[in-house]
Amino acid sequence: MSTRVRSIMTVFILLVLLGVTAGPASAGTKTYITAYECCEVSEFAGKEFFPDGRYHIRGAISTFTFWSEDPRLDDAINRITLNANFVLMDPPIYAAGNMWGKFVITNDGGWWEGTWTGVREKNGFSYFHFVGHGGGGYEGLELRIRGERLDPDPSVTEIYHGYILEKGG
């Protein structure tokens, strides 16, 4: 058997095995949502350091107001931890680079808890991705949203699009 045929057969067998072990995806209901958030308070409980002229943040805390047409995200508070590896930029941008951390979005109905990643580009625009699981009244639900702030000013409202997944049995 030639090396090429052996490689193709190996890939085929792996794909079959992955399909068998993964099984069918569980059905669920996705509710697509739009949400908005605006920074209320930036506390600093973390560490800042400047190796080689770069700006690093670990464990900073910020609180945002969060609202949406979906009551599971409306009238909520989002408290995030922020870690970042930034390069310093001239005003009004100040910094650009990768960000990540944890979040808890809470309202009267329950909470969402998970992790987020983001990037602040050299033009000052920021993009975010949140993945979390519900608790309290949102137990068993999953939240997946992507956000953006198309302005270097961190006080400008961010817009999020994504969905809430209710997994099927």
Image (cartoon, rainbow, N blue to C red):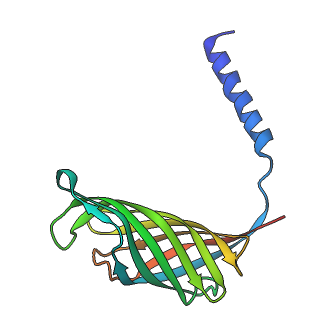
Q: Is residue 123 above or below residue 53?
A: below
Q: Is residue 32 left or right of residue 19?
A: left
Q: Residue at x 81, y 66 (%)?
A: 168
Q: Residue at x 40, y 77 (%)?
A: 62
Residue closer to the observer: 50 or 71? 50
Residue closer to the observer: 78 or 29? 78
Corner quadrant of residue 88: bottom left
Residue closer to the observer: 51 or 160? 51
**Rendered location of residue 55, percent (x, y):** 24, 60
Residue closer to the observer: 75 or 20? 75
**Rendered location of residue 38, percent (x, y):** 41, 84
Q: Is residue 140 above or below residue 100?
A: below
Corner quadrant of residue 73: bottom right
**Rendered location of residue 10, percent (x, y):** 68, 23
> What residue occupies the far left of the structure in this picture?
90
Q: Is residue 59 above or below residue 22?
A: below
> What residue occupies the far top of the structure in this picture?
1
Q: Is residue 150 left or right of residue 10?
A: left
Corner quadrant of residue 28: bottom right
Q: Is residue 140 left or right of residue 145?
A: right
Quadrant where the C terminus sits is bottom right
Q: Judge whether residue 122 can be spotted in this image.
A: no
Quadrant where the N terminus sits is top right
Q: Residue at x 43, y 81 (%)?
A: 63
Q: Residue at x 71, y 34 (%)?
A: 15
**Rendered location of residue 58, percent (x, y):** 36, 62
Numbered circles on residues, count: 0
Q: Judge whether residue 152 can be spotted in this image.
A: yes
Q: Is residue 57 left or right of residue 31?
A: left
